[in-house]
């Protein structure tokens, strides 16, 4: 099997699995208890928090564990939208876990403004800043697109937005960027940053939200007071401990070689367009639209041959569109045949070479079948 759907999820790395198993079998104590064994579990959680904080160059106490980035994003949108007044600005490139909470608020009468994308999949910065005014409470801009890997310069954007309105809470969904591109969040103007463990060799069901110290965010869950009273509930200890191990083990070295190799091969497929267009995209995701092919069928044909790739996310099961690609102006034919190839440090250049040959031959096979 050649697994190239790492933007959907990754295989947990060895260090993460080992740490999680140890926490399940041996260090199962409740970190809130006061005996030594429990304190050791608490310390292991804090080590994990520190590993994440080092990666984001922020303070450990600014990291709050959640059940994943969907939760982090929902928390950020709902709580970042202070006093439920004014307006919110997001982009057409947001993941559903930002887009849907914003659309939900719009349904409740909130003024939600949605900035367009440029043809290379980035937020249109000028349009976005022009949507911000003195009544804007929250701006949310995805860091790396889960569809195309396009990177937004969230650091410059946060500066520009705050020049216009210093009271704005600036959130970014950093799931597909975390560990893959430098993110010095601590020294930036970003207030909230969401991350998830299972995209970087951690375990599903744990994520975190960076909350800038001093920001008046409402608690997500009330109860026993865990996560410094912001997110109560007994901690998901095995996954949290594994998260830190995954951060420390993530290796970006091979990614650009694999990316360059794959993109050059995919460019040679006739009637295919690369939707990962900008030179500074993350080196972990390639989106390619192949004309005349239904991507689900191609996905099945490839999986039969041992190559697992992803699809761009559809707007809904009824609608075969894709909001992000549509916002980039990609033609319908290429959206229907859009596939997403995404890497992890587990992949090798040899695997990419084999997968590219299989993808090319499968596309030819598919096309010759429909022309019969
Ligand atoms: N944001 C982005 C950009 C993602 O790619 C994903 C996962 O697909 C999420 C948020 C949701 O993360 P989780 O699976 O941890 O809820």
Image (tube, rainbow, N blue to C red):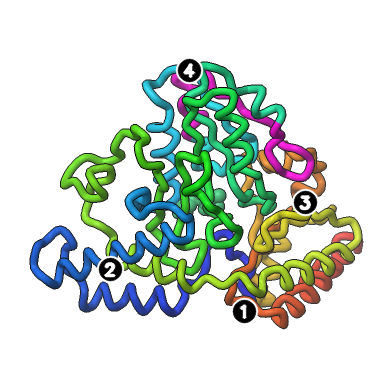
Question: Residue at label 1?
Answer: 1
Instruction: Find numbered disc 2 in the image and state the secondary structure of the residue it sits on.
Output: helix
Q: Position of residue 274 (x, y in %)?
A: 80, 55
Identity of the residue drawn at 47% across and 28% down: 104
Q: Which label was assigned to residue 247?
A: none
The answer to whether the residue labelled 3 contacts the one labelled 4, judged by CB atoms less than 8 Å apart, is no
Q: Earlier in the sequence, mark 4 or mark 1?
A: 1
Decide: few, some or many residues near mark 4? Use Cα within 10 Å; few <14, some 14-19, many ≥20: some
The answer to whether the beta carbon of the residue marked 2 is less than 8 Å from any atom of ligand 1 is no
Q: Position of residue 33 (x, y in %)?
A: 11, 61
Q: Earlier in the sequence, mark 2 or mark 3?
A: 2
- Give the CA distance from mark 2 to mark 4: 41 Å
Question: Residue at label 3?
Answer: 278
Q: Is residue 270 above or below residue 346?
A: above
Instruction: Find numbered disc 1 in the image and state the secondary structure of the residue it sits on.
Output: loop
Report the mark closest to the observer, 2 or 4: 2
Instruction: Find numbered disc 3 in the image and state the secondary structure of the residue it sits on.
Output: loop
- Give the CA distance from mark 3 to mark 4: 34 Å
- Direction from residue 121 to residue 316 in the image, left or right: left
Q: What residue occupies the far left of the structure in this picture?
A: 35
The answer to whether the beta carbon of the residue marked 1 is less than 8 Å from any atom of ligand 1 is no
- Direction from residue 95 to residue 304 in the image, left or right: right
Q: Is residue 296 visible?
A: no
Q: Earlier in the sequence, mark 1 or mark 2?
A: 1
């Amino acid at each position: 099997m050649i697994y190239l759907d790492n933007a959907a999820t990754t295989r947990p790395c060895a260090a993460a699995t080992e740490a999680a198993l140890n926490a399940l079998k041996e260090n199962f104590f409740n970190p809130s208890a006061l005996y030594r064994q429990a304190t050791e579990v608490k310390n292991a959680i804090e080590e994990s928090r520190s590993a994440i904080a080092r990666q984001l160059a922020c303070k450990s106490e600014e990291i709050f564990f959640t059940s994943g980035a969907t939760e982090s994003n929902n928390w950020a949108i709902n709580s970042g939208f202070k006093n439920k007044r004014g307006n919110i600005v997001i982009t057409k490139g947001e993941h559903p876990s930002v887009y849907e909470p914003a659309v939900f608020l719009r349904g409740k009468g909130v003024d939600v403004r949605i900035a367009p994308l440029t043809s290379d999949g980035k937020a249109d910065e000028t349009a976005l800043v022009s949507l911000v005014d003195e009544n804007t409470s929250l701006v949310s801009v995805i860091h790396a697109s889960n569809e195309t890997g396009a990177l937004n310069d969230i650091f410059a954007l946060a500066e520009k937005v705050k020049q216009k309105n210093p009271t704005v809470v600036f959130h970014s969904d950093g799931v597909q960027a975390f560990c893959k591109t430098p993110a010095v969040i601590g020294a930036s103007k970003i207030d909230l940053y969401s991350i998830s463990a299972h995209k970087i060799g951690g375990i599903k069901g744990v994520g975190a939200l960076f909350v800038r110290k001093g920001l008046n965010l409402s608690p997500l869950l009330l109860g026993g007071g865990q996560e410094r009273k912001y997110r109560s509930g007994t901690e998901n200890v095995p996954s949290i401990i594994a998260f830190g191990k995954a951060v420390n083990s993530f290796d970006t070295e091979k990614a650009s070689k694999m990316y360059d190799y794959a993109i050059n091969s995919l460019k040679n497929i006739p009637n295919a367009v690369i939707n990962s267009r900008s030179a500074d995209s993350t080196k972990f995701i390639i989106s390619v639209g192949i004309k005349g092919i239904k991507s689900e069928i191609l996905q099945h044909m490839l999986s039969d041959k041992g190559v697992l790739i992803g699809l761009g996310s559809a707007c809904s099961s009824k609608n075969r569109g894709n909001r992000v690609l549509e916002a980039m102006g990609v033609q319908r034919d290429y959206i229907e045949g859009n596939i997403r190839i995404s890497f992890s440090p587990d992949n090798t250049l040899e695997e990419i070479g084999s997968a590219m040959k299989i993808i090319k031959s499968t596309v030819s096979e598919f096309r010759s079948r429909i022309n019969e």
